Image: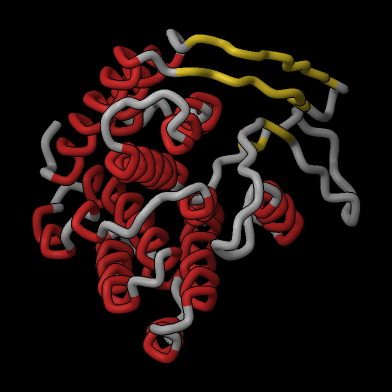
């Protein structure tokens, strides 16, 4: 990937990112970003999918009342279980989400442990060169500074993302993104607890159908990989549940200008007790398969 392409990718990612855990509104849309500082040869239009980082998601969750529950994270001891590339990639995403959670909630020692788990998974996926060797020294120096940990966590995620894109390993990246999405929803569903109307965490979860659609559409680019295809099929079972949610308000417009595809508007969705339980059970089932390395 050339420098211009890296700029486009970074812009597409950063446009969905919230700096730190202070708050802000999460976005979930599909957009293209055009780099105006380079001459672009005529090519087929490319669509870049905004996929919220775990840091972004947890920043919103913390602001609306999510609590710190470290026991929900995938234990670092489980890294020894992952021998297949598929499960290494999925759990790289899971550990990245856990790292974001620990960093956002300023769980200092856990953050250090999960950085090491991410590093271990990265080494086994042969993406260790994506990480700056000084990062762990920076972590140790900032264990009590939540904002700094969040910043380092974000950097780590983007570095891995960019490395996989630049080295044509999109199939691995697709699994990483899937694992991160599942873990994020799993953690928040446990923070939310049983169904309760107007629970802000449950309301936020109801809006994640769009982000799941973006994840799946991004993954489809690598559908020829059997591991990616299997994972898409599993995520589609969750997507089917989202498609049954009650639509409270919907106003989405699509504009295709030839070189750009823009979605705009908003949609509000609402769980019933039944659909919420269906979704949380399915997410738990899928997450258990991933952390236990079972197909």
On screen, residue 96 versus residue 31, left or right, reads: left
Quadrant where the N terminus lies? Answer: bottom right
Q: Position of residue 217 (x, y in %)?
A: 52, 26
Answer whether residue 13 is visible to the viewer in this image: no
Q: Position of residue 208 (x, y in %)?
A: 49, 30
Answer whether residue 152 is visible to the viewer in this image: yes
Residue depicted at x 83% and y 50%: 35
Residue placed most toward the observer, 247 or 227: 247
Q: Position of residue 239 (x, y in %)?
A: 41, 19
Residue depicted at x 74% and y 36%: 32
Identify whether 285 is placed above or below 127: above
Identify whether 242 is placed above or below 36: above
Q: Position of residue 57 (x, y in %)?
A: 50, 47
Residue placed most toward the observer, 137 or 229: 137
Residue 276 lies in what quarter of the image? top left
Quadrant where the C terminus lies? Answer: top left
* Image coloring type: secondary structure
Number of numbered discs on residues: 0
Outermost residue on the front side: it is 197
Residue placed most toward the observer, 184 or 228: 184
Residue depicted at x 54% and y 71%: 151
On screen, residue 92 versus residue 295, left or right, reads: right
Residue 192 lies in what quarter of the image? top left
Residue depicted at x 28% and y 25%: 230
Residue 288 lies in what quarter of the image? top left
């Amino acid at each position: 990937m050339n420098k211009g392409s890296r700029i486009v990718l970074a812009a597409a990612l950063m446009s969905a990112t919230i700096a730190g855990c202070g708050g802000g509104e999460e976005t979930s849309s599909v957009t293209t970003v055009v780099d105006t500082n380079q001459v672009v040869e005529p090519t087929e239009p490319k669509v870049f999918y905004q996929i919220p980082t775990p840091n972004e998601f947890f920043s919103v969750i913390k602001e609306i009342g999510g609590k710190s529950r470290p026991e929900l994270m995938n234990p670092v001891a489980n890294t020894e279980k992952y021998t297949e590339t598929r499960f290494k990639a999925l759990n790289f995403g899971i550990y990245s989400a856990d790292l974001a959670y620990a960093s956002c909630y300023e769980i200092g020692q856990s953050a250090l442990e999960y950085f090491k788990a991410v590093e271990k998974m990265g080494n086994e996926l042969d993406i260790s060169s994506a990480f700056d060797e000084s990062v762990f020294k920076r972590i140790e120096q900032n264990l009590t500074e939540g904002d700094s940990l969040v910043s380092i966590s974000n950097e780590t995620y983007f570095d891995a993302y960019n490395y996989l894109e630049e080295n044509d390993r999109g199939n691995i990246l697709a699994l990483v993104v899937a694992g991160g999405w599942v873990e994020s929803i799993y953690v928040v569903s446990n923070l939310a607890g049983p169904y309760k109307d107007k629970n802000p965490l449950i309301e936020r979860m109801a809006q994640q159908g769009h982000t799941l659609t973006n994840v799946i559409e991004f993954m489809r680019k690598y559908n020829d990989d059997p591991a990616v295809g299997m994972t898409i099929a599993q995520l589609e079972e969750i997507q089917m549940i989202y498609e049954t949610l009650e639509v409270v308000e919907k106003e989405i417009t699509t504009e295709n200008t030839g070189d750009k595809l823009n979605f705009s508007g908003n949609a509000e969705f609402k769980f019933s007790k039944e659909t919420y339980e269906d979704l949380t059970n399915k997410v738990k089932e899928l997450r258990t398969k991933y952390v236990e390395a079972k197909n």
